[in-house]
Image (cartoon, grey):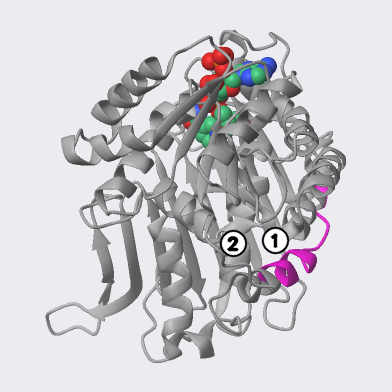
Amino acid sequence: MRNRTRSDSLVFFGASGDLAYKKIFPALLAMARRGKLDFPVIGMGRSGWTRDQLVERARASVTEYGGFDAKAFATLESRLKYLDGDYNDVQTFEQLRAILAQCDSTRPAHYLAIPPSVFPGVIEKLHVASCTREGARVIVEKPFGRDLESARSLNDTLHRAFPEDHIFRIDHYLGKEAVQNMLYFRFANAFLEPIWNRHYVSKVVITMAENFGVKGRGKFYEEAGVVRDVIQNHLLQIVSYLAMEAPAGTYADAIRDEQIKVLRNIRPIKPEDLVLGQFSGYRKEPGVDPASRVPTFAALRLFVDSWRWEGVPFIVRAGKALEATQTEVVVELRHAPPVVFSEDTPERSNYIRFRLAPNVAIGIGARAKRGGDEMVGAPIELSVVEEGVQGAEGRLGDYERLLGDAMEGDATLFARQDIVETAWSIVEPILGSDNPVHEYEPGSVGPTEADRITAG
Ligand code: NDP
């Protein structure tokens, strides 16, 4: 169902937090710069702050992360309100309802930029205090649960207060320009369709590598691990974008209906299709159990049991403290038959590459004849898109795009309940896996045991 009435205020819980500082204020400033910040923004906190302190915090945030712009900041400042209170006390929410009434807001969007343990209490009190009536929406930060059971329980809590099409579960990865371009490139070009299947694709390799460790967030990481942190959400979403059939349009459910079909067709993961790793030194990080088995690296081989993809491995690798920071997808095509030119071809000769980070690129791998008498070739990469920076001039930042879409009621880039729960059921066997956790050196490509997965 489409739900495109615009929200008429933004209430954001966690105004004093890290995410607000790094992402939300800069996104609001960017909206102000584009003339899109025409609604009241009510920051919620529990730190005993005043509104002036919130304004100063917003100023510091945009100076550090957004680039200060006096005119846009004046708009942001004029829209900002602040309510301080205890999230366990229903009176805080009654005060919020009064502020919404003063602003003539009947369709607030409540954004929960707070730790997940606090979500259920806040949702329930919003409901008890009648802040969820009419066209109210809720925007929920990741992580959405820590396994299938907790995700279902959170969904039940949300559904007691909001209908599904008023719930916006953020996976900020989907807001990224490069991920959008991947979807666009697939379905705006007819030439890909004949080769986008098991007859031409030999394997798909999705890699998300980071050259840094847990950056002092050991306690958080002990709760998450690589599977919860990036595979259950970002990387499975990418698998679904790559493997899905053409949607009937670009509206939210058209795309999400195709994504869910892919996820439902993923075969249960067997132990031999999984290699786990942990970088040497992880156990000495502050907040980490000295005997921790939490994986900081995983390589898995997935199969999508569909007519199009039967037998094609989708190899998903992600890890911390690796040699480089890079996220990319390589769709490898089968070799040309070595009949005409009998030279040895490298392992990857024809492929489509989507580089998602740190730079954005789409490239096509091919072979071309080298100059000279001999019929000998060399690999080349045809560049389709080659951009240095994400968030360049004129470009929507990921949080600006997501917040703007949620305010408009466009749920395309947000995870639907069935998608979240199916993604949890795919990774559940990995979360409880008895597979060994192999140690690897920081700055390497991960444990060598993963090579057999990468081989396809
Ligand atoms: P913080 O730890 O900075 O906390 C955010 C806010 O929640 C703060 O305003 C804090 O208030 C409040 N808070 C903390 N604990 C409690 C509690 N027990 N009861 C009530 N309020 C509480 O978190 P982040 O800003 O880092 O993250 C917020 C959400 O965004 C989380 O769901 C996180 O997973 C998600 N997220 C964060 C990212 C990031 O880069 N930070 C990236 C992607 C998602 P006070 O200041 O008073 O303690």
Q: Which residues are magenta?
A: 259-271
Q: Is residue 117 above or below residue 274?
A: above
Instruction: Say which amino acid is labelled 2.
Output: Ala
Which residue is under mark 1? Answer: 165
Instruction: Say which amino acid is labelled 1.
Output: Asp
- Residue beneath the point at 73% across and 76% down: 310
| Depth order, front residue of 229/85 | 85
| Depth order, front residue of 389/335 | 389
- Residue beneath the point at 34% across and 54% down: 36
Q: Quadrant of residue 436 in the image?
A: top right
Drawn side of residue 359 relative to residue 121, left or right: left
Q: Mark 1 falls on what kind of element?
A: helix
- Residue beneath the point at 66% across and 30% down: 225
- Residue beneath the point at 37% across and 41% down: 28
**Residue 261 in magenta stretch:** yes
Residue 353 coordinates in the image, percent (x, y)? 40, 65
| Depth order, front residue of 151/101 | 101
Q: Is residue 431 above or below residue 106?
A: above
Drawn side of residue 59 relative to residue 319, left or right: left
Residues tagged 2 and 1 counted as in contact (Cβ below 8 A): yes
Which residue is under mark 2? Answer: 411
Q: Quadrant of residue 376 in the image?
A: bottom left
Q: Is residue 362 above or below residue 318?
A: below
Q: Quadrant of the N terminus?
A: bottom right
Drawn side of residue 205 relative to residue 339, left or right: right
Q: Is residue 94 above or below residue 195?
A: above
Residue 302 coordinates in the image, percent (x, y)? 71, 59
Q: Residues within 10 Å of mark 1 (few under 14, many from 20)?
A: some
